[in-house]
Image: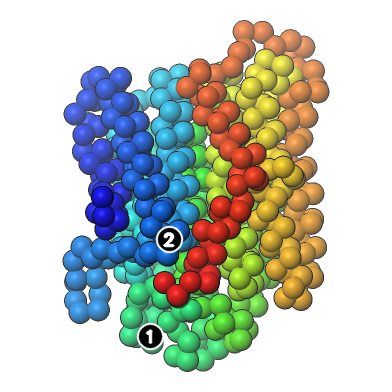
Amino acid sequence: MAPETLITLAILTPLVGALVIPLFHDRPNLRETVTLVTAGTLLLIVVNLLGPVLAGGRPEVTFVEVVPGLSLAFKVEPLGMLFSLVASSLWILNSIYSIGYMRGNKEPRQTSFYVCFAVALGSTIGLAFAKNLFTLFLCYEALTLSTYPLVTHKATDEAHRAGRLYLLLLLGTSLLLFLPAIIATWALAGTLDFTPGGILGGKASGLVIGVLLALYVFGIGKAAVMPMHFWLPAAMVAPTPVSALLHAVAVVKAGVFTVVKIVLYVFGLDVLSTTGANTWLIYLASGCILLASLIALSKDNLKARLAYSTVSQLAYVVLGAALATTMSLEGSAIQIATHAAGKITLFFCAGAIYVATHRTEVSQLDGLGRAMPFTFFAFLLGSLSIIGIPPFGGTWSKWMLALAAADSGHLVVVGVLMVSSLLNVGYLLSIVGRAFFLPPRDGVVTGIKEAPVACVVPLSLSALACVVLFFQIDAIQALVAGALTSPQ
């Protein structure tokens, strides 16, 4: 099948699934079969695009030209290929997990849940393959709107407040900052197409480049760069599979992916490094890494702790983009993949704990490791990857970022990365230690066992992926290198 056809199918498959799922709203087994078949089909399509991209091809397809020079178009390049592989792979695990979680908790409105999930994944794939800023912006907004019902799924007052904040921050930053940045880019460069080496070289002064960079960074609210991060902890009121979607599969990953893609294909590494327009962002990202880690350390609610951990870990990706070197961009791209595996594992574990025990606070987990060994061992593996300890995937991104910072003379950043890893140990491994080595708070743990197998299997597989990624780093690096070295 032609790569151009595969692109179209990759974008449309989740949307077709979203149309078919409601037909079986009163037949849960068939409804969830459609979800799994849709997810599996999407992964198969995306995997079949990998070969042409690795061979140097950059297949593209134009859906419609809105005005001359402005079209709804998609093009598969290495960064988008990596992101689409991450999203489509984890969608399968998240779908299996959702079945166990939603049924185990007897959650309402399960059909609408799966429909919105499918639309969100379709939007994510469209964003990953966007050929230009116009297409990316449309998919970015579609992702916001399709995930809003997931954030408010529980329909409680708290959920509705979180949903309002979600829309206010994400739509507000998009319309007031992101969209003006896109319009200014078009006015300056005369194009919105993503181009190797960037499109702004020689088109604007260093000051204008710095202002544009700020508009993009703060306008892409999904990247959760402080102080545009408040929506993320608030959204933890959603069911845990939604939290996994927000943190690992789509939303925040879409945010930092967008930042990296714009830095590479709109600004260009040479423009940022020679003008010095990136310096402020290096220190902002470093501050976010440390501050969010300290806040995470203070949180007793498990999902809140993991949420602030995500704010910190996403800042690693932004930091790599800000350093604007080939190695730092490689580190950012790899961090997107390895953090996704590690963080989805941690959220899967948090959800499994809730399904089995209805406990939500870290202080309530003492001694639970003996009753739920699979869950807490998986939590340990995910934590070690997030921290960056060999042989886990998260090791490589932090190593590359540290080397890139040292090579560019930013030794303070190296220190930030080291301190951050120690803080990661404090707020993650303390959870595992309490679960395995402290006695239960009530003296005994009775009547508690592992969550349903549909929850335990996905978290075990994602934990295994944290190890596998360590040994597959060459393949990821080879793919990412295509974005940094090939003429495309």
Instruction: Classify mark 2: residues with Cα within 10 Å, few (<14), some (14-19) or many (20+).
Output: few
What residue lies at 26% left-to-right and 63% top-to-bottom?
61
Depicted 35 relative to depicted 304: above or below:
above
Q: Position of residue 30 (x, y in %)?
A: 27, 22
Under circle 1, the secondary element is helix
Quadrant in the picture for residue 75? bottom left
Q: Position of residue 314 (x, y in %)?
A: 59, 55
- What amino acid is at disc 2? Ala
Badge 2 vs badge 1, beta-carbon distance below 8 Å = no
**Can residue 80 be seen in the rendering of this structure?**
no
391 lies left or right of 58 = right
Quadrant in the picture for residue 481? bottom right
The label nearer to you, 2 versus 1, is 2
Q: Which residue is mark 2?
A: 55
72 lies left or right of 358 = left
Depicted 201 relative to depicted 239: above or below:
below
What number is the disc on residue 189? Answer: 1
Classify the position of the C terminus by image quarter.
Answer: bottom left
What residue lies at 60% left-to-right and 73% top-to-bottom?
324
What number is the disc on residue 362? Answer: none
Quadrant in the picture for residue 280? bottom right
Depicted 39 relative to depicted 265: above or below:
above
State the residue in front, 375 or 87: 87
Residue that extends furthest to the front in the rendered view of this protein: 55
Q: Position of residue 181 (x, y in %)?
A: 41, 76
What residue lies at 75% left-to-right and 45% top-to-bottom?
389
What residue lies at 20% left-to-right and 79% top-to-bottom?
68
- What amino acid is at disc 1? Ala
Residue that extends furthest to the top in the rendered view of this protein: 447
Instruction: State the CA–CA distance, disc 2 to disc 1.
Output: 30 Å
